[in-house]
Amino acid sequence: MNKVIFILFILLVSCAPKKNFSLNDLEEIYNFKAKSVAYFENEKKENIHEFLVFDNSSSLAKQKALQKCQNFIISKKNDNLICKIKYIKITKKVETSLN
């Protein structure tokens, strides 16, 4: 009886959703990554904050990265900040499947 309870416990714990993914884990799960940056309108060289987003669609990754950046600007209540997409790249998952 104890073995059955132990096995059920292990199965339930392993089926729980994972929360703390590393960047390498996300690279293996999703197909695209997009990075957006927030910077002051006057000083284009200095990035205030960068946002990295992963998704299976390049357009969704881009939209989510811009949305995160815009939410950051709204939370800071600063009209002098601008969002811009820095890049959209394929992840390791796609690179390894192409080889």
Image (cartoon, rainbow, N blue to C red):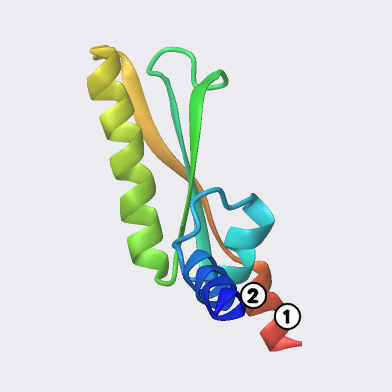
Image-quadrant location for residue 2: bottom right
In this image, 29 relative to 65: left or right? right
Q: CA distance from mark 1 to mark 2?
A: 6 Å
- Mark 1: give few (<14), some (14-19) or many (20+) Cα within 10 Å: few
User: Quadrant of the image for the C terminus?
Assistant: bottom right
Going 63% across and 69% down the picture, which residue do you hit?
28
Spot occupied by residue 80 in the image (x, y as percentages of width and height): 30, 13
Which percent across, then down, holds residue 20? 55, 48
**Picture residue at 23% right of the left edge, 22% below the top:** 74
State the residue at coordinates (28%, 42%): 67
Q: Amino acid at mark 2?
A: Lys
Q: Which residue is mark 1?
A: 96
Quarter of the image with the N terminus in it: bottom right
Residue 46 visible to an observer of this rendering: yes
In the displayed structure image, the side of residue 94 where residue 11 appears, left or right: left
Helix, strand or loop under label 2 = helix
- Percent across and percent down for residue 33 are 52, 58
Image coords of residue 40 (percent x, y): 41, 16
Classify mark 1: helix, strand or loop.
helix
Measured along the vertical axis of the image, is residue 41 above or below residue 36? above
Q: Are marks 1 and 2 in contact (CB under 8 Å)?
A: yes
Which residue was labeled with disc 2?
Answer: 93
| Mark number, residue 37 | none
Amino acid on which the number 1 mark rests in the picture: Thr
